[in-house]
Image (cartoon, rainbow, N blue to C red):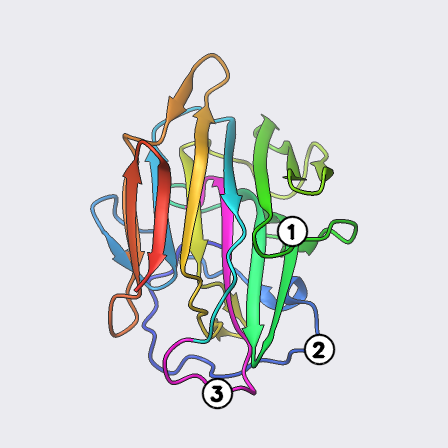
Amino acid sequence: MLFSKISSAGLLSTFVPGAPLTSQRKAIHHSRRASQVYNSNWAGAVLIGNGYTSVSGQITVPAPQLPSGADSFTSYCASAWVGIDGDTCSTVILQSGLDFCVQGNSTSYSAWYEWYPDYAHDFSNIQISAGNVVNVSVEATSVNSGTVVIENLSTGTSVNHTFPPNFSGKLCEFNAEWIVEDFSINGGLAPFANFGSVIFSNAVASTGANSFGRLSATTMDIYQDQVLTSSSVTSHGVIVSYI
């Protein structure tokens, strides 16, 4: 789910709700300047440096709401994830996180993992609900292999996935990210849910020998004809709010 600089004009208003989100979600491959603050689909914080090998963060799963002007027949979604690369390195992303969607009075959640340029894959054996405290971590074991772990601390369950060596593409290890995303689906951006606020607490990145907090990270927000998010980095974590 690479950073996108495409215009929000002409985006999809609906998508097919029957197919898994992970099979529909597509990455849009564009790079950005480090100084750019607003973009079409990423909000949160990114560390830019060299040699990042692990990233983790803990969130309380939000209860998504319909945005203003929404209809009850459309699914509105957002995604929260941690990852390595995809910002100033645009070839590969190692990432894992949660999708949360609302349609009418119904909400749904899924946990997933991805090594772009492959699309995301769902974990099938973990349940996620609003209010659960979930820890997400990714680790690059080499530039072309890695692992992801999602732990539902509220239920005591966890899942993991290992990407074997020689998997498609090589990491640059330039970026560590904590992101809320309006992901791309069916050729455009998914209708964006009002997710309230997502706080990535215990947000830490590592280069192996050294660990880094998020306080030196650059923040970014989503702009689609208007600013949709407000992101900040504080002693409490990376905070992303829908506005």
Q: Are marks 2 and 3 in contact (CB under 8 Å)?
A: no
Dot 2 crowding, Cα within 10 Å, few <14, some 14–19, many 20+: few
Residue of label 2: 18
Earlier in the chain: of badge 2 and badge 3, it is 2
Q: Residue furthest left?
A: 35
Quarter-of-image position of residue 29: bottom left
Q: Position of residue 135 (x, y in %)?
A: 58, 38
Q: Which residue is at 34% across, 43% downward?
A: 45
Compared to 132, does 156 lie above or below?
Answer: above
Tell me the amino acid under the disc marked 1.
Trp
Query: Which marked residue is nearer to the observer: mark 2 or mark 3?
Result: 3
SS label for mark 2: loop
Compute the Cα span from label 3 to label 1.
27 Å
Dot 1 crowding, Cα within 10 Å, few <14, some 14–19, many 20+: many
Residue 20 shown left or right of residue 102 in the figure: right
Q: Position of residue 228 (x, y in %)?
A: 30, 66
Q: Looking at the picture, tell me which residue is in the foreground, 205 or 186.
A: 205
Magenta region includes residue 232: no
For the record, the magenta segment spans 67-86
Q: Looking at the picture, tell me which residue is in the foreground, 133 or 112.
A: 133
Compared to 241, does 211 lie above or below?
Answer: above
Compared to 101, does 210 lie above or below?
Answer: above
Q: Which residue is at 51% across, 26% downward?
A: 53
Tell me the amino acid under the disc marked 2.
Gly
Dot 3 crowding, Cα within 10 Å, few <14, some 14–19, many 20+: few
Which label sits on residue 112? 1
SS label for mark 1: strand
Residue of label 3: 71
Compute the Cα span from label 2 to label 3.
18 Å
SS label for mark 3: loop
Magenta region includes residue 83: yes
Tell me the amino acid under the disc marked 3.
Asp
